[in-house]
Amino acid sequence: MEATPSSRRLLRRCALAALGAVALLETVPRFVDLPRLNMAALNPPYLDSDEDLAFEPHANLVLVPKAEYANVNDQGKRVVHDADGFRGAGLLKPKPAGVFRIACLGGSSTYGTGPTSNEATWPAVLQRCLADALPGREVEVLNGGVPTWTTTESLISLQTRVLPYEPDLVLVYHGMNDASAALWPEPRSDGSHFRSVWPVLRKSPVEPILEHSVTYLVWRRYFTDYLQRRLDGNYKAIRDYDPDYVDPYGVGPLPAVGFDTFTRNLESTVAVARAHGAEVAFVTQAVWSEDPSTEDFWSGRNRMRALGMLEDRLRAVADELEVPLIDAAPELLVAEQLRDPAGVFADDVHLTDRGAALLGALVAAGLEAQGLLGD
């Protein structure tokens, strides 16, 4: 059907309006600093630079903390990595004579995603508590935790990154991430169902040209998941990561693969540490859930069920291999319930400064009570 003069005029007006809107969008943000439309928001410089990222790819471990990284974020949280990527000021290699050295293995709760500084993480608190309790003794604590890591990665890290520091004692604080791996669909014993390969972005030849267009940058920033995929650390480490992930198992039985893997990793960690002259102790990990009866993947019924099964495996390995166990989880959960004067959890698993201080003190007391600090 042939267009009428009035319809053609309407189309021309719509086209002109659209062109005018694009022209405004292309010009105004270049001269006026508008919230959400400035270049820093639309095309952050760190998209094309790894300098601002706290983690980097690793041949055996997907990711590790970047060596000599230092940052203070907008909330005042301070993170510093040493020359080997461990969170802290750096320890000497080889170990000086007379030093008793402890290495802490774990995920983000050990690394310190919740606390506000290196000094507020529970491994750092542990070192201070032991220094106060054991005057005249030199005790050093290495923070070997890394966000998203399970016992699989910690075992590899123990062999390749931690043992050169010659630890006398290895502490294992794991649970939450191994529960995620156990609940992820179609579990495999090597963790490949859960662990992603670090993504490498290869831009198309036209992408740098399009990035000169504000209209294109607005579309990419606010109507696609481009920035989330580039910046989200979990995306880089967890396969098919989705913050709204739905639990695939309902009320049915949970597959045994992830729990068997957890057991095997604990046994191997003990064997490797002892083969190199270090003792091992397990620490139960606390996870807080506001409502454990929900279907929420991260803090619902099956997460709590999986954590209970993992703790049973932890206790069984501790009994079988005569590994000391520090049962810190119940006291952390009681402290969160009391919230006096404040809570100890920043979310379901990460600790506040107060929570990390409590955990560090509990571990220190447990080590002393069980005679694990040598002579």
Image (cartoon, grey):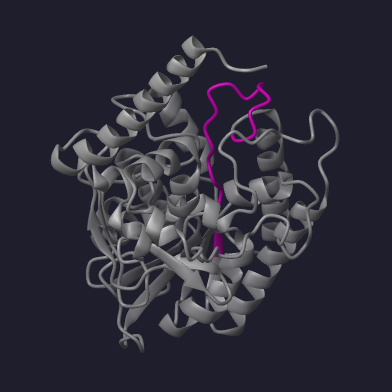
| Quadrant containing the C terminus in the rendered view | bottom left
Camera-side residue of 83 and 144: 83
Camera-side residue of 331 and 198: 198
Residue 305 position within the rendered picture, expressed as x and y whole percent measured from the top left: 71, 35
| Quadrant containing the N terminus in the rendered view | top right
Residue 70 horizontal side relative to residue 191, left or right: left
Camera-side residue of 255 and 100: 255
Give the total number of marks visible in the rendering: 0
Is residue 364 visible in the rendered structure shown here?
A: no
Is residue 111 visible in the rendered structure shown here?
A: yes
Residue 265 position within the rendered picture, expressed as x and y whole percent measured from the top left: 68, 65
Residue 33 horizontal side relative to residue 289, left or right: left
Chief secondary structure of the magenta span?
loop
**Residue at image x 47%, y 76%?**
162
Q: Image height check: is 192 above or below 159?
A: above
Picture quadrant where residue 65 is located: bottom left
* Magenta region: 281-298
User: Residue 295 colored magenta?
Assistant: yes
**Residue at image x 51%, y 73%?**
58
Residue 356 horizontal side relative to residue 254, left or right: left
Camera-side residue of 303 and 71: 71
Q: Image height check: is 371 above or below 6?
A: below
User: Residue 194 colored magenta?
Assistant: no
Residue 198 position within the rendered picture, expressed as x and y whole percent measured from the top left: 55, 65
**Residue at image x 50%, y 68%?**
170
**Residue at image x 36%, y 46%?**
356
Residue 319 position within the rendered picture, expressed as x and y whole percent measured from the top left: 70, 58
